[in-house]
Amino acid sequence: MVSGITSCWPRFFSPTPHDPADVQRMALIGLAGGTISSLYSQVYGPLPIDGVELDPAVIAVGRRWFGMNQPNLNAVAQDGRYFLAHTAARYDVIAVDAYRPPYIPFHLTTVEFFSSVREHLTPNGVVAINVARTDDDYRLVDALTATLHALFPSVLIIDEPTNGATLGNSLVIASQQPVTLADWETNTARLTHPLLVTVAQRARGHVRLAPATAAGKPWRDDLAPVEQTMHGLILRFLLAE
């Protein structure tokens, strides 16, 4: 539920009423086969999307086999952090979908990286990250939440229901502006697009505001223990099997 479709509407976590026209430009770090860019185009029309993918072969596969040929999509074969460091563009939404557990690029998890993300957001912009977890181990979600809280006033989390499965996903969203759960409820109550209405209904009850006081220590370039965190998560998962 969360990992693909709900990435279409992080802008509903905003203190002001949401209008689709407010979303003028998007960056996607981790384009892959173009699922998220395609969904955004369905909902918001042909808004400019910069899709960054490290491997040019993946872009070629997306174009050939997954219909990733929307004219509004600018596919760039580059490292996501390098791309942000060399563009002057600003975005209403920056989505990070570049984590492939257990191989997560540490340089896309730190305060320094998200500082660059923040610099490329519009005043009401948001960043959204897909973060893996198990049904009872949120240590990676917690680490990314703590890191975002070092830079953003509000962090919200949508925990995908596992429905009895042991592996899951959370969508972690940070806003440039202070927001509340009431803002999300108000904005989603106004939805008319069928896709967004369905997703909002399925997400209701699984959205939470992450308190800054319980965030923990943010990750930085000189200390971002991604491998240690993932190995601990995997080991706990295997021992529980």
Image (cartoon, grey):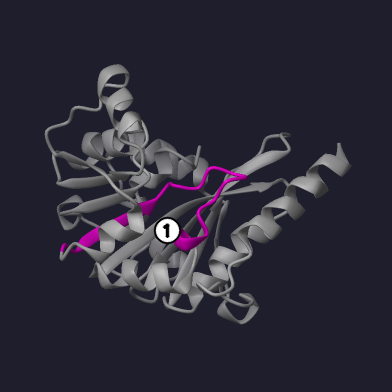
Q: Residue at x 37, y 40 (%)?
A: 197
Q: Nearer the viewer, residue 74 or 197?
A: 74
- Exactly how many numbered labels are in the figure? 1
Q: What percent of the width, then of the height, locates residue 3? A: 48, 41
* 136 displayed left or right of 3: right
Q: What percent of the width, then of the height, locates residue 45? A: 16, 39
Q: What percent of the width, then of the height, locates residue 178? A: 39, 76
Q: Check residue 96 for magenta coloring.
A: yes
In this figure, which residue is indicated by the disc labeled 1? 185
Q: Nearer the viewer, residue 165 or 208?
A: 165
* 62 displayed left or right of 41: right
Q: Is residue 45 above or below residue 120?
A: above
In the current view of this chain or complex, which residue is farthest to the bottom?
Answer: 213
Q: What percent of the width, then of the height, locates residue 126? A: 33, 63
In the current view of this chain or complex, which residue is farthest to the top?
Answer: 65
Within the image, what quadrant is residue 36 found in?
A: top left
> Is residue 21 among the parts visible in the rendering?
yes
Q: Quadrant of the C terminus?
A: top right
Within the image, what quadrant is residue 213 found in?
A: bottom right
Q: Residue at x 31, y 21 (%)?
A: 66
> Is residue 186 among the parts visible in the rendering?
no
SS for callout 1: helix
Q: Amino acid at mark 1?
A: Glu
Q: Residue at x 40, y 68 (%)?
A: 114
Q: Residue at x 35, y 31 (%)?
A: 58
Q: What segment is highlighted magenta in the picture?
A: 89-108
* 161 displayed left or right of 98: right
